[in-house]
Each structure stands twice: as C-alpha cells, then as structure tokens.
Image (cartoon, rainbow, N blue to C red):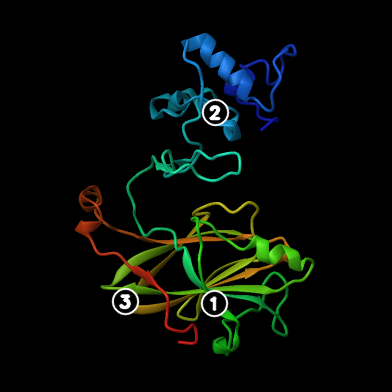
Amino acid sequence: MWACVDPVHVDLGVVRGGPPDTVRGVGPAVAFAQEMFRRTGVPQGILACAHGGTSMSQWDPKLKKLGGKSLYHGYGTDPFRNITDEADRMLPVFGPIPVGQLRARTPMITTWRVALPVDLPPGVDAKLNGLNPPADPAGLPWRKIEFPTRFCDLHLEIGPMKPRDFIVWYACRLDVPEPMKLGACLGYDGPVKLWLDGCELFHDPNGTNPAWEDRVKVRFDLEAGSHDVRVALGSNAGNAWGIFLRFERRGVPARFLRKGPAAYAMPGVVLADSPAR
C-alpha cells in the first residue's frame, strides 16, 4: 500500500510526498478523513483503511474512465466491496456487496468432512506432486466441520504442527438435478489439488498467499446425479491456512439470471454419509 503510485493516494500529500502532519494516527485513515471533511464538509466515520482510506464515491463505475484516479473495484468482472472490523471480520450489515455481473453461483461451501493431519504417501512431495485420492478414505480421521465464515480456515490447527508437511483433506458431494455446464471457483492458501469423481481438475503446487475468493475457475460438464468432490491442501510446513470453494453454473441466459435462482436449476452441495463412498 505504501508503494502505491496511483494519484488517488499520492494526492493526499500526508501519506507520501508532503510535509509531515502534526495529527497522530496509523496509516492513511486520518489523512483521508481530514481531506474528505475539507472537500465535502462531511465527517468520516467508516474508513476503508485496507484500500488506502478511500471514499465510496471513488469506486463508482462512472469514474472508471479516470484510470488511476478512480478505484472502480480493481480488475475483473465481478469484484466485491467488503468492510471489516479491526480483527478483519466482515461486518454483515455492509458486505460483501457484489457489484459485478449477475452469475449463477452456489454459496461458498462452509460445511465439510475434513481429515487432518494425513501423512504424505510414498512418492508424494510437499507440493502434492503425485498425489491421488486416498485408496482407503475410511481409514482417515474424518470429522464434520461447519466453518463460521466463507473461508474454510484451519490455520489454528495447522500452524502448531510446524514445520511438518502433511495433507488436509476436504470432502463433500455435488448433487446435480440435470446435465449442467459448471465451474469450480476455488481460492486457497497453500498447495492444492481438486478432484471430481476421482478425476483431477486442478493442481497448484506452489499455492497462493493470501487466499482469494474465486482465484481460479475450472470449467467442466456434469451429468445429472451425485458427484464426489475432494480437495487436498498441503500444509506448506505448517504455513497453509485453508480454502474457498463454490460452484458456478455456466451458460444461464441473462433473462433468467435477472429473475433469480428460482428461474433455473442449480447444483446442491451436501455431505456424504461417509467420505468412503
């Protein structure tokens, strides 16, 4: 943030390039509040400090043509605005607020059967190269976890095991009422692999940090029925955190998207009676 060169940050002066100010504070929030009050006469209460302390008006799509002087929700077709408290927890009154194009997506999957720690099988390295779904899943220490947020975060369990490398397994099932064109929208902090019905769909041996929602979208087609979903997360020597996962139905006509989910069928995400199925 401090190295940002966009004029919208530099113009504040106090953040970088101007004389020091006598007002004490952390980060650009105080400078932002003062500048907004000077320009508008409106005191500032909620400050988007993680984005350099910017006003919501600077995210207006009408300002996109201004380039670096606008913060029109970054890049991509479906970003979101999210306001958090000091502990980085979402404030549900405010966000996240989708601002991109309409899409047919399931909610983030937050209920899983999880197994950890699982030793790396012979011939499999810490980046999950050579890893296949377990031959005997019933022998793993599965338990049901209902995660409290959209991010399926296990770093409090993974971290104390540093520097050990191991696997975290996530398992669920996808119920598809009719043939569908789908996409798996995956975000992850740590090396990751994704399988559907035992077929590998995606592998990032290096992982990412931090995890971003919908970092990748893996496209595939499915017939009607129940389908097995497995995600393996490498512990990255105890530094991995977790995953995001949801599914998108592709090819839904815009007229149905505007009507909402009641106008089209969607896959359902459920837990299997046992991950051994």
Mark 3 vs mark 1: which is more N-terminal?
1
**From the viewer's perspective, is the residue at label 3 or at label 1 nearer?**
1
Badge 1 marks a residue whose secondary structure is: strand
Mark 3 vs mark 2: which is more N-terminal?
2
* Amino acid at pointer 2: Leu
The relative height of residue 74 versus residue 153 in the rendered view (above or below) is above
The answer to which image quadrant residue 134 occupies is: bottom right
Labels 2 & 1 near each other (Cβ < 8 A): no
Q: Give the number of the disc on residue 47.
A: 2
* Amino acid at pointer 1: Arg
Mark 2 vs mark 1: which is more N-terminal?
2
Q: CA distance from mark 3 to mark 1?
A: 29 Å
Q: Give the number of the disc on residue 143.
A: 1
The relative height of residue 275 versus residue 243 in the rendered view (above or below) is below
Relative image position of residue 225 (x, y in whole percent)? 31, 79
- Residue 157 falls left or right of residue 172: right
| Label 3 sits on residue | 223
Badge 2 marks a residue whose secondary structure is: loop
- Residue 260 falls left or right of residue 274: left
